[in-house]
Amino acid sequence: MKLRHNDHFVGYIFAAPFVLGFLIFILFPMASSLYYSFTDYNLLTSPKMVGWDNYVRMFTDDDKFWKSVKVTFTYVFASVPLRLAFALGVAMLLNRSIKGVGFYRSAYYLPSLIGGSVAVSILWTQVFGDQGIVNSALGLIGIESTKSWIGTPETAIWTLIALAVWQFGSSMLIFLAGLKNIPKEMYEASGVDGAGRIRQFFKITLPMLSPIILFNLINQTISSFMTFTPAYIISRGEGGPLDSTLLYSLNLYKRAFEYYEMGYASAMAWVMLLVIGVLTLILFQTSKYWVHYENKGGN
C-alpha cells in the first residue's frame, strides 16, 4: 500500500508542470477573457460590467467587425485549399527515389519555418510592390505593370494568400509520410486491371490519404484564422488599403491595444473561438462521408 502511495505521489510530481501550466497559461486566461467580454475595460480603470452590450454592438453597430469577418473568411477559404492542394502535389512529386530528394524535401519545407516571420513579411512587400519582382517578371514576358499588388484593395488580400500557400512545407511532409504508407501492391494490382494514373489518384491515393487530409485541413483552418503577423507587417498595422487586409486577428489586436477596448476585444476573441469550434465540428461530422479508415473496412 505504501509503495502504491509513493507511485501516486511520483505521478503527481511529474504531472504537476503540465497541470500548473494549463491552469496558469490556459484556463485562467480563458476565464479572465470570458469575464472581461461582459465588461467595459480599458486596461487603465477597473472593469465595469455591461452584460451583453459588447456582443450586441459587435453584431449590430460595428462595420469594421463585419469587414474583418469577410476578409478573414476570404483568406481562410482560399488559402487553405490552395495550400493543401499544392502540398499534396509537391509531396507526390517527391515521393520518388530520385537523386537529391532529401535536399528538395528540406528546401520545400524551409518556407514553413520562416514564412510567417517579420523579415519575410517585409520582403513580401517588396516582392509585390510597384517595383517588385512580380512586376519585373511580368515585364519579361511583355506585360508592363507598375501596379502595387499590395497597395491595391482588389489584390492585397491575394498577396497574403500567396504567402500562406508558400508555407506549404509542413503539410507536404505529413502528406509525404502518408503516401509512403500506401502499399505499392494496390497500385500494381490496379495497373494490371487497366487503371491509369488519374484513376489511381482518385480511387487509391485520395481515399487512403483522407484521414491525413482531414488532419491537415483542421490544422490549417485553425492556424489560418489566427494569422496575424503577415497582415500586421504588410499593412503596417492598419489592415489597408481600405481594410482589404483587415484580418479578424488584426482587428482584434487594434481594438485591444490601440483603442484599449479590452472588454470588446475579449468578446471578439470568444466569437472567433466559437466560429473555429463550429467549423471544426462540421469537419468532423462530415468526415464520415469522405474519410476512409482502413481498420473499419470503409467510411
Image (cartoon, rainbow, N blue to C red):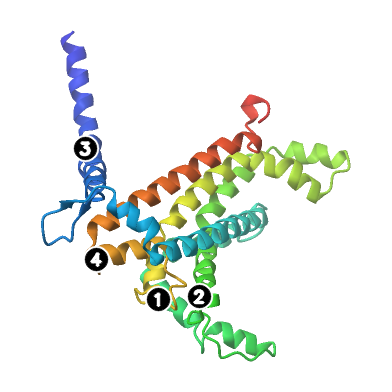
How crowded pointer 4 is (Cα within 10 Å; few <14, some 14-19, many 20+) is rated as: few
- The kind of residue on which mark 4 rests is Phe
Element class at badge 2: helix
Give the distance between the C-alpha atoms of the residues marked 3 and 1, in whole angstroms: 39 Å
Q: Are marks 2 and 1 in contact (CB under 8 Å)?
A: yes
How crowded pointer 3 is (Cα within 10 Å; few <14, some 14-19, many 20+) is rated as: few
Q: At 57% across and 82% down in the image, what residue appears? A: 134
How crowded pointer 2 is (Cα within 10 Å; few <14, some 14-19, many 20+) is rated as: many
Mark 4 or mark 2, which is nearer the start of the sequence? 2
Q: At 37% across and 70% down in the image, what residue appears? A: 232
Give the distance between the C-alpha atoms of the residues marked 2 and 4, in whole angstroms: 24 Å
The label on residue 17 is 3
78 on left or right of 42? right
Residue 234: horizontal and vertical position, in percent?
A: 41, 75
Mark 4 or mark 1, which is nearer the start of the sequence? 1
- The kind of residue on which mark 3 rests is Pro
Q: At 85% across and 44% down in the image, what residue appears? A: 195
128 on left or right of 64? right
Badge 1 is on which residue?
235
Give the distance between the C-alpha atoms of the residues marked 3 and 2, in whole angstroms: 44 Å
